[in-house]
Amino acid sequence: MDCGKLICSEKSNIKEVMTYIDRNSKGIVFVVDADSRLVGVATDGDIRRALLNGIGLGDSIKTCMNEHFTYTSNPVDAQRIFQQCDGKFKIIPLLDEDMHVIDYVECSNRQHIALAQPQLNGNEYNYLMDAFLSTWISSTGKYITQFENNFAEYCGVQYGVATSNGTTALHLALAALGIGEGDEVIVPDITFAATINAVIYTGARPVIVDIDEDSWDIDPYEIEKAITPKTKAIIPVHIYGQPCDMRRICDIAEKNDLYVIEDCAEAHGAEWKHKRVGSFGIISCFSFFGNKVITTGEGGMCLTDSKELDDKMRILRDHGMSKERKYYHEVIGFNYRMTNMQAAIGVAQLEHLDKILEWRYEIEEKYRHIFENISQIQMQRNDLPDRKKIPWLVSVLVDEKVRDTVIEKLKYHNIDARPFFTPLSEMPIYRQYARKCVKSRKISKRGINLPTMFEVDEVKIEKIASVMKKVW
């Protein structure tokens, strides 16, 4: 800490000290004598009261400084003082045995409310240490198979292929389906860039289409309009935990002989007609990044009911190496493997996925209850027919004219909030692939993702609501 900006001479007058306080932005100065020993402390409040009592700007700071100040030589003791004095002090000087200022300790009541954080209160540590002590810490081990099987079963699918992350899962799915140069793949305008990037990796051409205004998901009507003889696949993204209209999308795909590759990165446990997402596509892809519903730190998975595709993805995932002949490569593959240590965390996370979803639903309902009387805030819909959304992040819409101001105000109060994804069609590197997208731009400019973690309670949501209301 730079305590020099907080130190002034006892010979300074009040006007000079006010300049010190203005420059250090701490609201306090440490007053020292000619031998640099601390003799007093003055706050902006002390000076304000002195001026109101008739003390002049040219008078000595000694006229209003506090000579009976609190100090310590131990930062640990400072924390105890903060707790005992219940907010009376914000800054406590740290002194050496000769009363020289060597540092200071600052107390802040601005608790940071994070957007998301992993919930690691199950067997994560136990399984991780088991994997570590087994020495099977790389891409082979019992937890990889266990995680693949358990997650596939959870989603109602036969096979799971664990990958290094969600992006490699998407690329692996496209590669296994033989999609490449000359092909077209339809993607929604609002999604994380990984969706479109994976298509571009293959050499295929992505086709960006607009979203449905109610669900914020890809619009099936826009999919139909975008199909050409070159179209090979559709990637519906269950955005912010909201399932897409999978009946219409699957019907369109069947009618036009197209593959459906589900992007379920943000929708673990969401359902369409009582059937979990990840069970509709010929291949479905998940992410287990740190901010997802369940996490392995980094990591992903491809799900499929096809034994042929399962075998193919496993070969491609492992450098294209033959299963029968070690170090013999039949195709050009990738290194997209998950480690046994990551999978160990995934197995533990999956054990309490239902509980994780339960508290996420509870948090979202608390937001709904507190926001219901704030007409300027529109929450993500949870009443669409046949859909059971999950709260990945609590997502709301506000007037686009104040959206950025709301986010700035929240961050000023130490509350993490994020704008919606920028539509792909607005970014120069992707613009060439876009059809006309109006609704996605409209929704994106209004969208905010709010803190969604276990520690968010009614008090914190009330604080968030209070800050947001001040904007209006």
Image (spheres, grey):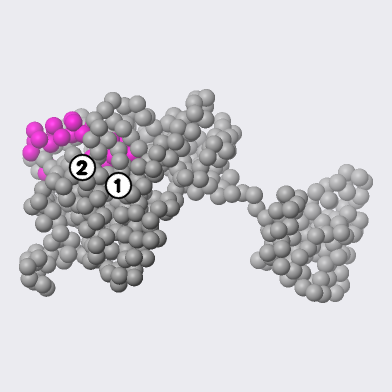
CA distance for labels 1 and 2 = 17 Å
Q: Secondary structure at mark 2?
A: loop
Compared with residue 33, is residue 164 higher up or lower down, i.e. above or below? above
Give the residue at mark 2: 156
Q: Residue at x 25, y 38 (%)?
A: 276
At x 18%, y 44%, the residue is: 157
Indicate which disc, 1 or 2, sits on the residue closer to the N terminus: 2
Q: Quadrant of the C terminus?
A: top right
Task: Answer with the quarter of the image where residue 208 lies.
Answer: top left
Which span of residues is magenta-colored?
231-257
**Nearer to us in this view, 334 or 368:** 368
Residue 220 seen in the current view: yes
- Is residue 443 found inside the magenta-colored segment of the image? no
195 relative to 370 in the view: left or right: left
Q: Is residue 232 magenta?
A: yes
Query: Where's residue 272, x and y in %?
Result: 25, 33
Tell which of 464 and 134 is nearer to you. Answer: 134
Height in image: 40 above or below 373? below
Q: Which residue is mark 1?
A: 265
How would you rate the neighbour count of disc 1 (Cα within 10 Å): few for under 14, some for 14-19, many for 20 or more?
many
Q: Position of residue 326 (x, y in %)?
A: 10, 72
